[in-house]
Image: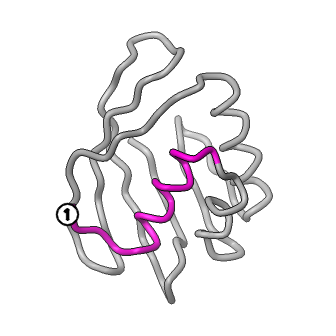
Amino acid sequence: MNMPNIVRAYFDADGRNDADTLTAAFCEQGVVVDEGTRHEGRDAIRSWWVAAKQKCQYVTDPIEAAGDDSSIWVRARVSGQFPGSPVTLDYAFTTENGKINQLEII
């Protein structure tokens, strides 16, 4: 599957439960929007991700990707301990200077 290295790094770190590498994939003032809530800055992103992993113990498996180096959409199957598991979610990334500056999970 073709996706920018930094987006692949995000999914690889997520799969390894590696909060440090996942957080480092974002620019300093990066933003994640998930379930209607905005998380801004690396500290907030780390807190969001750690809480979600602990709560749902989810695994993300990218199944499709499209876009270019600055704007990429990834469809992924997410399974874990939450109602309706597994689900298919869309991850909309924007990147700049080799870092993720925004991720919206739809």
Position of 28 compared to 96: left or right? right
Q: The N terminus appears in which quarter of the rendering?
A: bottom left
Residue closer to the observer: 103 or 60: 60
Q: Position of residue 101 (x, y in %)?
A: 54, 72
Q: Position of residue 76 (x, y in %)?
A: 31, 41
Q: The C terminus appears in which quarter of the rendering?
A: top left
Q: Residue at x 47, y 33 (%)?
A: 59
Q: Kindly state the secondary structure of the residue where label 1 is placed.
A: strand
**Residue extending farthest bottom:** 97
Q: Is residue 105 above or below residue 79?
A: below
In the rendered image, residue 3 lying in the magenta stretch gets the answer: yes
Q: Position of residue 44 (x, y in %)?
A: 76, 53
Q: Is residue 31 above or below residue 77?
A: below
Q: Position of residue 29 (x, y in %)?
A: 69, 72
Query: How was the colour assigned to the protein in this rendering?
Result: one colour
Q: Residue at x 59, y 23 (%)?
A: 56
The amino acid pointed to by label 1 is Ala
**Residue extending farthest front:** 16
The image quarter in which residue 77 lies: top left
Q: Main secondary structure of the magenta part?
A: helix
The magenta segment is 1-17
Q: Residue at x 44, y 45 (%)?
A: 105
Mark 1 sits on what residue?
A: 66
Q: Is residue 102 above or below residue 49?
A: below
Q: Is residue 8 above or below residue 50?
A: below
